[in-house]
Image (tube, rainbow, N blue to C red):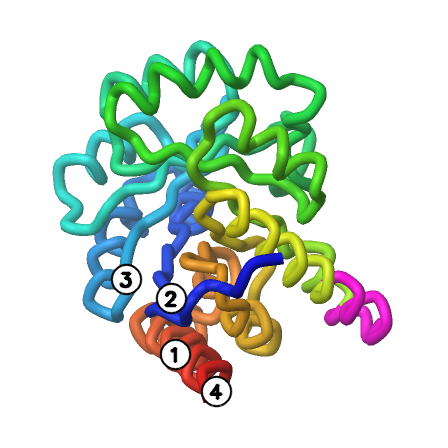
Amino acid sequence: MTATAPLGRLRLGVNIDHVATVRNARGGPYPDPLRAARLAEEAGADGITAHLREDRRHITDPDIEGLMQGLGLPLNLEMAATDEMQAIALRHRPHAVCIVPERREERTTEGGLEVARDENRLAHFIAPLREAGSRVSIFIAADRRQIEAAHRIGAPVVELHTGAYCEAHLEGDAAARDAELDRLRDMAAFAHEIGLEVHAGHGLTYDTVKPIAAIPEVMELNIGHFLIGEAIYVGLETAIRRMRVLMDEARAEAAD
């Protein structure tokens, strides 16, 4: 393989979906995802991520309208590869669009998108989004076959799913955790080698973020559920600032 990427500043995208989840539990206007996004910006986030699901279980269409109009940070719109979502993205033209798998019965996004078995459709799906000026990323497992397929369909960015690594850490399975971390490192290097920008996310916490942040090819982390949960105890700005510190520490330590 070629040399690894130089260690630049790692971007943090804050996912605000679960601010909307709390709001929707009561059906009122509070808490407001746009206010959370502005607090995230003040705390050092580089972007905001929001997943507009088919069933609108958390983020809603008016939320996307509000974020596009009232947000100073770039918006990363997570969505399934459906005609409805493509039309919404083409109407709003967010800075970034991340294509994710979606099943109505899942609690959260489970696993990465199966690109290799759906290359033709996905290539045609993302082409108009790229032409509209949105940066397109594909949320996939750290798997060589999926990375190669994402490259072939013209996606400039892949986001590697860190869920298995985080789950192994939570379960105390050091061998599985280390194996997943090695896989993430190897596949980040491979994706970078073939010309893809590499992002990562899903399930990251204070305890798991530093090894991922230290991977030199990873340029952006997207983190949401943990930060919103931690905000209950310490406030959103404090939770995000702590994550930012850990990411920066990992980057600095890896550069030494």
User: Which circle's residue, 4 or 3, is located before the other in the chain?
Assistant: 3
- Residue 168: give x, y in percent of width and height: 78, 65
**Label 2 crowd bin: few (<14), some (14–19), many (20+), radius 10 Å:** many
Distance (Cα) linking label 4 and label 1: 9 Å
Q: Which secondary structure type mostly characterizes the magenta part of the structure?
A: helix
Give percent across and percent down for residue 99.
49, 31
Q: Which residue is mark 3?
A: 40
Residue 51 image point, x, y percent: 44, 37
Q: Write down the region rendered in magenta.
A: 169-180
Which residue type does callout 3 highlight?
A: Ala
Residue at left 55%, top 39%?
A: 139
Mark 4 or mark 3, which is nearer to you? 4
Image location (x, y in percent) of residue 207? 60, 78
Which one is earlier in the sequence, the residue at label 1 or at label 2? Answer: 2
Q: CA distance from mark 2 to mark 4?
A: 13 Å
Q: Please state which of the two labelled residues, at mark 3 or mark 1, is closer to the viewer.
A: 1
Work out which residue is located at the far front of the displayed protein and give it.
Answer: 2
Residue position marked by numbered label 2 in the rendering: 10
Q: Kindly identify which residue carries mark 1.
A: 248
Which type of secondary structure does the marked residue at label 2 adopt? loop
**Circle 3 sits in a helix, a strand or a loop, which is it?**
helix
Q: What whole-number distance in Å separates the C-alpha atoms at marks 3 and 1?
A: 17 Å
Task: Give, as a three-letter code, the residue at label 4.
Answer: Glu
User: How far is disc 1 from disc 2 in space, using C-alphas?
Assistant: 7 Å
